[in-house]
Image (spheres, helix red, strand yellow):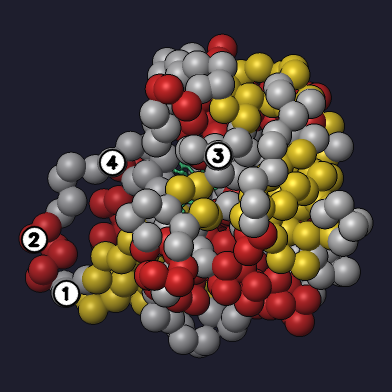
Amino acid sequence: MFAVYAAEPNPDQPLDALRVGERPDPEVPHGWVAVTVRAASLNMHDLWTLRGVGIKPDQFPMILGCDGAGELADGSPVVVHGVVGDASVYGDETLDPRRTLLTEKYQGTFAETVVVPARNVLPKPDGLSFAEAACMGTAWLTAYRMLFTRSGLRPGQSMLVQGASGGVSTALVTLGKAAGLRVLVTGRSEEKRALATRLGAHETFESGARLPEKVDAVFETVGKATWAHSMRSVKPGGTIVVSGSTSGPDPSADLQRLFFTQVRVVGSMMGTRDELASLLEFCRLTGIRPQIGTELPLADAATGFGQMLSGETAGKIVFTR
Ligand SMILES: NC(=O)c1ccc[n+]([C@@H]2O[C@H](COP(=O)([O-])OP(=O)(O)OC[C@H]3O[C@@H](n4cnc5c(N)ncnc54)[C@H](OP(=O)(O)O)[C@@H]3O)[C@@H](O)[C@H]2O)c1
């Protein structure tokens, strides 16, 4: 079948490891289902995979794509949940020490067909297109869990999103606005800050700029480049929720400020099947939709990877078939 995959790990030149071509048709194990993929979205995770981060060398070649939407054999439209883990033992599959995301052990969604456990598909709401639904399983689910499960924020409180134009960032802005939070955003360019304003941000700032007020919670996916600013921007007793470190981890975590201001730093990882179901319902009820900056045929995936690598994002990058 046709697929977009990583041939081998390449830490320095990740795009050199990207292949567009044929891979074997998948087998469908007992209890698993085959989904004919109609759309899938690009995540930073796919660039990490090309670099060999979070995947064992013997797992290559690996079809990329952590999320997607498509149809089951009977034609029913579904959204893919990309976390494969045991919810029956841990209650929350993201806490299963053996949990794995699509593309770490099992082949991903940038293909004609993806095969997942039967519990890893949810009905696609009618109001979401396949392209919109394809954004839900990773970036939007991560943002949903950060905001509604991990941050402890209540409607009426304030939040800062580090980064304006990325997949997780645009999801956080849209979800935060819809939930009645005061949304502040930093962005690296005028254009990216204007995008955040269009999505509902109340105020935007240049990266690193001093804020006129401290916020109840900061949402971090950038890491080293913004960490010190996040620590300075949160109220005493406030929360920083972290789900990524695109610019690198920060070994100098400002521990003195951490204990002096009694800040809570909370990690967050993808989300559960139940959270994905709630997210889909939240989108249906509120009418919010993901910001898609680029939509390309899967065969042109290399163009989308190039955009993400160079930071030219304007929301989600989606591949369709
Ligand atoms: N833990 C999880 O479950 C999970 C799930 C999804 C993603 N993630 C992680 O979250 C991160 C973002 O993923 P994504 O798919 O949303 O990526 P993306 O679409 O490429 O977005 C990257 C974002 O990072 C910002 N950024 C990058 N470098 C920066 C710098 N030097 N200074 C300031 N801002 C910078 C960009 O801000 P501008 O808009 O201002 O350019 C942009 O908003 C990645 O590290 C990814 O691995 C984690």
Which residue is denoted by mark 4 in the rendering? 249
Q: CA gap, disc 3 to disc 2? A: 42 Å
* Image quadrant occupied by the C terminus: top right
| Contact, mark 1 vs mark 3 (Cβ under 8 Å) | no
Q: Secondary structure at mark 2?
A: helix
Foreground of the two, 236 or 87? 87
- Front of the two marks 2 and 4: 4
Which residue is denoted by mark 3 in the rendering? 106
| Contact, mark 2 vs mark 4 (Cβ under 8 Å) | no
Q: Hey, what amino acid is under mark 2?
A: Gln
Q: Hey, what amino acid is under mark 1?
A: Gln
Q: Is residue 27 left or right of residue 163?
A: right
Which residue is denoted by mark 1 in the rendering? 262
Q: Is residue 76 left or right of residue 83?
A: right
Give the class, few, some or many, for how many residues have Cα within 10 Å of label 1's Cα (few <14, many ≥20): some
Q: CA gap, disc 2 to disc 4? A: 18 Å
